[in-house]
Image (spheres, grey):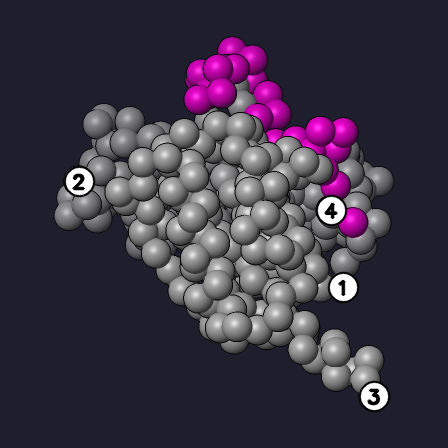
């Protein structure tokens, strides 16, 4: 009975760190979210100030409950083994920040730090659309393409914990330049940003509902393009068909590399639902080697805005 009582009293805080805000949530030993808080990072002048805000937030959201640990999700390159953010967000001095060491010193509890895409992947695997799979790849189609890999039930980080940058697989060496410096990366063809940019070029030459839908926002994004496709717009259909081809091409590389039984698709583009998934599944099946047909499923993510919090906390569950 004592063991059961102790387990019930274990709590974990998950933290999702962004360039403009920090979210933190308290979870119980069953993974239930009990309390959530969010603060802006504006006004912080040093990395130490940012970490101070994070630790204060953790103390507040935990409400005095004893913590088994704190999971941190941070954008950018993260050395998870050492708990150091190599580089990341627009936060001040956010280079080579020893998050784990600083926070463990302040909180006197174990802290684990993950890249945000890896945290999201783990969250989907433990609590979301990846639950029940053995080998899962999570891909988020958003401003860029983020990803995380779970192999044999374990989060795959690689030798230096930098594994999973699938968005920077090179699809076409003669393609457009990517923000990473290379040319033709997957994300310059298949991200939400790429869909918006391709549509913006098309509507300069041809009449399309996309222009009208985007007028209020000032610029074209993927949401406008999918909405125009739903309305039967020819330009939108052409742009989405092109994007689906490149999305599927990247997924075929994923399938051939990792042989996953499930691919979980997240990010803003995934919210297109039936305007995306049937075509994406069909094109992937068309491009993949025949031996792989029937070995995988492609599903939308199950967790939404709190996926980073859930994944970070699930490191302890």
Disc assigned to residue 57: none
Q: Earlier in the sequence, mark 3 or mark 1?
A: 3
Disc number lying in front (3 or 1): 3
Q: Which residue is mark 3?
A: 1
Mark 2, secondary structure of its residue: loop
The Cα–Cα distance between marks 3 and 1, rounded to whole angstroms, is 30 Å
Residue sitting at x 76%, y 29%: 159
Q: Is residue 214 left or right of residue 280?
A: left
SS at mark 1?
loop
Mark 1, residue position: 132
Q: Is residue 282 left or right of residue 46?
A: right
Instruction: Find numbered disc 3 in the image and state the secondary structure of the residue it sits on.
Output: loop
Q: N-terminal of the two: label 4 or label 3?
A: 3
* Residue range corresponding to the magenta coloring: 154-183
Q: Position of residue 130 (x, y in %)?
A: 68, 58
For this orientation, the residue located farthest to the top is 174
Callout 4 touching callout 2 (CB < 8 Å): no
According to the picture, the residue beneath numbered tag 4 turns out to be: 155
Residue position marked by numbered label 2 in the rendering: 218
Q: For this rendering, which residue is in front, 284 or 5?
A: 5
**Answer yes or no: do the residues labelled 4 and 3 have beta carbons within 8 Å?**
no
Distance Cα–Cα, label 4 vs label 1: 14 Å
**Could you tell which of marks 1 and 2 lies nearer the N-terminus?**
1
Q: Secondary structure at mark 4?
A: strand
Q: Categorize mark 2 by other alpha carbons within 10 Å: few (<14), some (14-19), many (20+).
A: few
Which of pointers 4 and 1 indicates the residue nearer the eye? 4
Q: Earlier in the sequence, mark 2 or mark 3?
A: 3
Is residue 151 or residue 7 the one in the foreground?
7
The answer to which of marks 4 and 2 sits earlier in the sequence is 4
What whole-number distance in Å separates the C-alpha atoms at marks 1 and 2? 43 Å
Is 118 a magenta residue? no
């Amino acid at each position: 009975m004592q063991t059961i009582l102790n387990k019930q009293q274990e709590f974990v805080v998950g933290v999702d760190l962004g360039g403009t805000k920090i979210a933190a949530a308290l979870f119980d030993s069953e993974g239930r979210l009990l309390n959530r808080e969010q603060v802006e990072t504006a006004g912080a002048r040093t990395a130490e100030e940012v970490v101070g805000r994070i630790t204060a937030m953790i103390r507040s959201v935990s409400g005095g409950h004893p913590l088994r640990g704190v999971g941190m999700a941070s954008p950018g390159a993260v050395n998870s083994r050492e708990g150091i953010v190599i580089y990341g967000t627009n936060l001040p001095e956010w280079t080579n920040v020893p998050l784990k060491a600083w926070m463990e010193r302040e909180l006197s509890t174990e802290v684990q730090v993950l890249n945000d895409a890896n945290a999201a992947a783990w969250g989907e695997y433990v609590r979301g659309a990846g639950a029940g799979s053995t080998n899962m790849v999570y891909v988020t189609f958003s401003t860029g393409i983020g990803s995380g890999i779970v192999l044999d039930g374990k989060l795959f980080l690689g030798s230096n914990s930098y594994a999973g940058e699938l968005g920077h697989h090179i699809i076409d060496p003669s393609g457009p330049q990517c923000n990473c410096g290379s040319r033709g990366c997957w994300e310059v063809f298949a991200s939400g940003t790429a869909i918006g940019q391709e549509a913006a070029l098309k509507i300069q030459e041809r009449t399309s509902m996309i222009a009208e839908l985007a007028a209020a926002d000032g610029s074209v994004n993927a949401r406008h393009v999918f909405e125009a496709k739903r309305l039967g717009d020819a330009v939108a259909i052409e742009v989405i068909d092109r994007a689906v081809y490149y999305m599927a091409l990247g997924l075929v590389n994923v399938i051939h590399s990792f042989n996953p039984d499930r691919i979980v698709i997240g990010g803003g583009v995934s919210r297109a639902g039936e305007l995306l998934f049937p075509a994406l599944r069909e094109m992937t099946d068309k491009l993949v080697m025949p031996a792989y047909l029937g070995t995988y499923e492609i599903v939308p993510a199950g967790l939404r805005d709190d996926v980073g919090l859930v994944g970070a906390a699930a490191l302890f569950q």
